[in-house]
Amino acid sequence: MRLRNITGSREVISGSPYVIKEEMQRECAGKWKDIFGNDSPIRVEAGMGKGKFIHTMAKTHPDINYVGIEKYSSVLLRAVHKMEQEELPNLKFLRMDAEDIAEVFGQGEVDRIYLNFSDPWPKDRHAKRRLPSGEFLARFARIIRSGGRLEFKTDNRALFDFALKELETASAWELEVSTFDLHKDTGLMRDNIMTEYEEKFSALGNPICKYVIIRK
């Protein structure tokens, strides 16, 4: 369960040079290359948790810019601490709800999007809140370039089945590859970076599902 109420976390985040201030977020749309100071591709993780995945990606690929989005201050704080210990110039954070993602990135400005172990929102009435839902796929389609990719991983088979079903009516997207057991797929595992949740769930023997879809 995610911690959501660490005293002082909002204050630390608001003063961090690694986090785009909330009042400045909408001014970022179309200007991310200026923010990073280069023309490198921009990749986004929506719901980044404690930041292990995106920090590792940014360290491994210094020629790519990364933006991590996390709603909860007490979780984002862990990612900020990672950056304080090992600062990376190609990584920035946003404390925001992913529903607003199309307000802070310009059309076609993003090269790739990662959804890792997103909240399954199991009740039917909350289906629109699931990150691989048709509603979110439409938001993501607005900001990702033609030919760009979205990668989704989860250990929740019901959520993955839902995600595959949503693709049937998501006309902006094309399925490139999918698997119900990522860790047995040597091709997809070649460059796989595990999140904290993936390490935990795979150690318990839970199969990890993944798909990669392409923006038409």
Image (cartoon, rainbow, N blue to C red):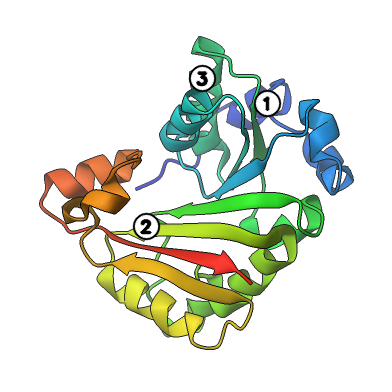
Residue lying furthest left in this view? Answer: 205
Q: Is residue 124 above or below residue 18?
A: below
Determine the image quadrant of residue 42: top right
Along the viewing direction, whichever of 181 and 21 lies nearer the viewer: 181
Q: Alpha-carbon neighbours of circle 2 within 10 Å: few (<14), some, or many (≥20)?
A: many
Q: Is residue 5 above or below residue 15?
A: below
Compared across the picture, whether 140 is left or right of 149 comes to: right
* Residue 189 rendering spot, x and y as whole percentages: 27, 46
Residue lying furthest right in this view? Answer: 27
The residue carrying mark 2 is 153
Quick one: SS at disc 1? helix
* Residue 124 rendering spot, x and y as whole percentages: 43, 84
Report the disc number at residue 11: 1
Q: Residue at x 61, y 58 (%)?
A: 148
Residue lying furthest top in this view? Answer: 85
Closest to the camera, between mark 2 and mark 1, is 2
The residue carrying mark 3 is 81
Q: What's the CA distance linking mark 2 and mark 1?
A: 32 Å
**Amino acid type, residue under disc 2 in the picture:** Lys
| Residue 131 visible | no
Instruction: Tell whether label 3 touches label 1 (CB within 8 Å).
Output: no
Labels 1 and 3: the sequence-earlier one: 1
Instruction: Tell whether label 2 touches label 3 (CB within 8 Å).
Output: no
Q: Residue at x 63, y 62 (%)?
A: 147
